[in-house]
Image (spheres, helix red, strand yellow):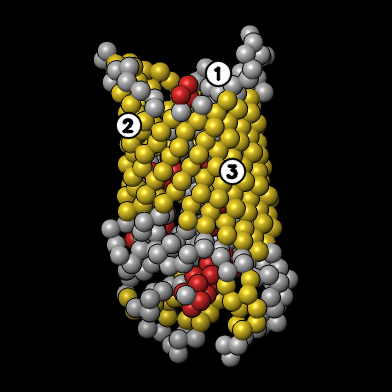
Amino acid sequence: MINVRNFLVLSYLVGSVCSYGQGTRFNPTTNKYTNSSGQTTDLLGSGDARPITTAVPFLNIAPDSRAGALGETGAATSPDAYSAHWNPAKYAFLQKDYAVALSYTPWLRKLVDDMNLVNLSGYMKIRKEDGVYLSLTYFNLGKIQFTDANGAAIRDFNPNEFSLGGGYSRILSDNLSVAVGLKFIYSNLTGGLTTQAGSESKPGKSFAGDVGVYWNKELMSGTKNSKLALGAVISNFGSKISYTNNNRKDFIPTNLRLGACYTLDLDLYNKFNFSIDANKLMVPTPPIYFSNSKGTDSTAIKDGQDPNRGLMSGTLGSFYDAPGKGKEELKEITFSYGIEYWYAELFALRVGHFRENALKGNRKYFTVGAGFRFAEGRGGIDVSYLISGKQNNPLEGTLRFSLCAELEKSSGKETESITE
């Protein structure tokens, strides 16, 4: 199991610290491309996988069971205690004055037995129009053993990461709300181990911000009540992160999420929610480098842009820097779909689908789940399960468990309004 774990953590480190490594290369002598699998092609993009990797990818792991069962949609779904991750602007439309939630996700259980993700989120209304929220996400990578070049054990270590953040959410009109948030990110993957190259490693640290917008409006569909909601959020926009004492820094996973949700009330007891999200990482796409006839690598770029650039340049340039131009940029968008059925606002069944282009990570899976709400809407329990359909998919069988409590202020102490 140690070998498997070392491979997992090494892969995680490669994705975090060496985000822009040996991708597609062009040989001007043979006039051919060599893709990341070592295959030679005449045309750019012919079967070449060029996924985008960043530091601290745990920031984009779905933390809760409800969204996890809906194919990881959440930009415009109805507000809940986990809105900090999906769209904090939704918090302002929560009906209760307080909400706190805890979620637990055993991670990659097909491969290891002690890697997990834990999320704790809470919200408190200030007035009817606004409120504040806090969210803590902790990612434990389990126990690993570091070895030297000869395979001799150096020491054991427990890599871990966390983000701690909070923010403010406010209703601007009957249908519109906004939110802003700030988070601190800490990533300790090596425990200060000195690399073979002589560089001393250190924990990575970063500050990042979130901004969200949420709009919803009641509609009529024949004789039935319905509602349309739209959401947009930019999350994890912040400083690049470094794990060594040299000048190398890597982007964190700044993400643009757009979503829509349509709610249809069939009658007093039966309700459906149909949701869809589109996500785009706002970080540089790996370029194509030159190589000579002997196969010697070069740092000269043939197509695309230098990924080692400033925060604003990398973020804004992420919409047009792909070597394959606009066609490749569209492939970098992931899509999520979800359907949620509620009976009497007490019991829910959920199903969803997540889809990523084969050349950009190839994550494709279905999700299912269920939820139960306590009397008077005082919270509930949710669970979700991931179905990949592929035996060798490490995400197969991922379970998520969530518990939420929602409370109101004491009787006779209504939350005040500054507009009434």
Q: What is the x, y in percent for residue 378?
A: 51, 26
Between marks 1 and 2, how big is the CA–CA gap? 28 Å
- The 10 Å Cα crowd at callout 3, few under 14, some 14 to 19, many 20 or more, is many
Q: What is the x, y in percent for residue 229?
A: 43, 28
Between marks 1 and 3, how big is the CA–CA gap? 29 Å
Residue 294 placement, left or right of 40: right
Task: Give the SS element for disc 2.
Answer: strand
Relative to 102, residue 315 above or below: below
Q: Disc 1 residue type?
A: Ser
Evaluate if marks 1 and 2 touch, with contact meaning CB atoms under 8 Å apart.
no
Q: Disc 3 residue type?
A: Leu
Q: Disc 2 residue type?
A: Tyr
Q: What is the x, y in percent for residue 160?
A: 61, 61
Q: What is the x, y in percent for residue 155?
A: 65, 78
Q: Residue at x 41, y 74 (%)?
A: 36
- The 10 Å Cα crowd at callout 2, few under 14, some 14 to 19, many 20 or more, is some
Residue 37 placement, left or right of 239: left
Residue 204 placement, left or right of 121: right
Residue in the foreground of this view, choosing between 81 and 197? 81
The residue carrying mark 2 is 341
Q: Comparing marks 1 and 2, which lies closer to the viewer?
A: 2
Relative to 30, residue 174 above or below: above
Sequence-earlier tag: 1 or 2: 1
Q: Which mark is residue 120?
A: 3
Sequence-earlier tag: 2 or 3: 3
The residue carrying mark 1 is 173
